[in-house]
Image: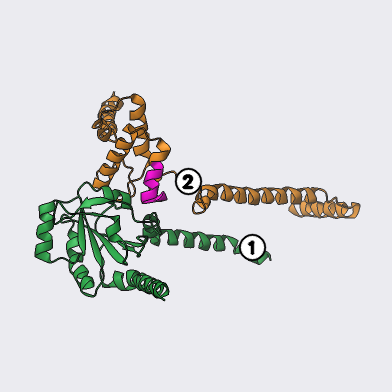
Amino acid sequence: MKMKACLKPLLIAGSIGWLSFSWASIDTYPFQTDEQRQRFRQLTDELRCPKCQNQNIADSNAPIAKDLREEIYRQLLAGESNQAIVDFMVARYGDFVLYRPTFSKKTWLLWLGPFILLMVGGGIFYRLIRKRSSSDASLSSVALTKDEQQQIAAIIHQHEESKS
Amino acid sequence: MARFKLFIPLLLFIALAGFLYQGIYDQDDSLTSALLNKPFPDFSLSSVQSVEQSFTKKDLLGEVALVNVWATWCPSCQVEHPYLLKLAKQGVKIIGINYKDNRTAAQQWLTKLKNPYAFNVFDEKGRLGLDLGVYGAPETYLIDRAGVIRYKHVGVVDDQVWLNKIKPKYNALMTESSGQEQQNSG
């Protein structure tokens, strides 16, 4: 019962927060088709506001973000493809506006870096494992000679006698 | 050899730290590079002073110049203004883009604070600004005689910015183009 009581305001607050997030800016533009609305949402979500830097165009209140929303809207209605609109933005604001940068001479490390690190880490891990198992194997393969076995037995025997 | 292996993590750390450090302080380059060495975008806009007079890209060509994006709503532009006057007095050609502003307010600004600009275009909708990749004011572009953008500075131009960042490039362009002139005439 107590659980429910505190969940309710949380749920309400959460849904208000969610609703007020990136939807407000979308609904001011009338679209002819749902497909256009979908694409508008996708584009404004994926493009980064050049002024505010860690917000996308959909969420930002900066004047430049508003201009860019209008420009995207205009180009969408004019029948431009998503790629053409993204290219338009990149030509003006650089790769910076892409949250998902294209693969190029400048960004290859960004894209491949994690995989390279993973491979390096994997390689080191593999070598460590192999080293350990091979040293285990070499240990077990060393058999004691008869002499040595007798010596050990003698030592154990002495030890037990001294205890009792 | 085994000793050396112990230092590999340290070396990796230094390399990564250097990489990230550079990423932090290299930021303005990533934003300013998009239009570098590309031709200034085409435009046809009216003058701030008069609705009837209009300017196009052709009016930019022929001289090394600064193109300054400004607006009366921009406080940093007011800070920058005296320095632009100083540069204009030294003979630097400055062209103004009045960005998303009110024409009357812009005219009053120019009368009151004096006018360092060779001419000013009125970019009411910010259309030229959008083509230039402007994301705030003030911004200053250095263009060569062919109208190619050679440098962009975001923020106020002051002594430090001018002397360290813009002037060397400006001087290089000036000698480059005067050299061409001599070749052409000779």
Q: Position of residue A113 (x, y in %)?
A: 54, 50
Up-down: is B3 above or below A3? below
Q: Position of residue A79 (x, y in %)?
A: 36, 32
At label 1, the amino acid type is Lys
Which label belongs to residue A102? 2
Q: Quadrant of residue A70?
A: top left
Q: Colour of chain B?
A: green
Count of numbered badges drawn on the protein? 2
Q: Quadrant of the C terminus of chain B?
A: bottom left
Task: Say which of A150 and B104 sits in front.
Answer: B104
Q: Quadrant of residue B117?
A: bottom left
Residue visible at 25% across and 50% down in the picture:
B44
Q: Mark 2 vs mark 1: give the one in front.
A: 2
Q: Gap between marks 2 and 1, in whole Å? A: 36 Å
Which is the main secondary structure of the residues drawn in magenta? helix
| The magenta stretch spans residue B99 | no
Residue, disc 1:
B5
Task: Say which of A145 and B129 sits in front.
Answer: B129
Q: Secondary structure at mark 2?
A: loop
Asked if badge 2 and badge 1 are on a common chain, one would say: no
Magenta stretch: give its range: A86-96
Name the outermost residue toward the front. Answer: B186
| Circle 1 crowding by C-alpha within 10 Å: few under 14, some 14–19, many from 20 | few
Up-down: is B44 above or below B177? above
Q: Position of residue B114 (x, y in %)?
A: 13, 66
Specify the subunit that label 1 lies on.
B
Q: Is residue B88 left or right of residue B10?
A: left
Q: Colour of chain A?
A: orange
Residue visible at 26% across and 28% down in the picture:
A30
Residue visible at 31% across and 42% down in the picture:
A57
Q: Secondary structure at mark 1?
A: helix
Does residue B60 appear in the picture of this structure? yes
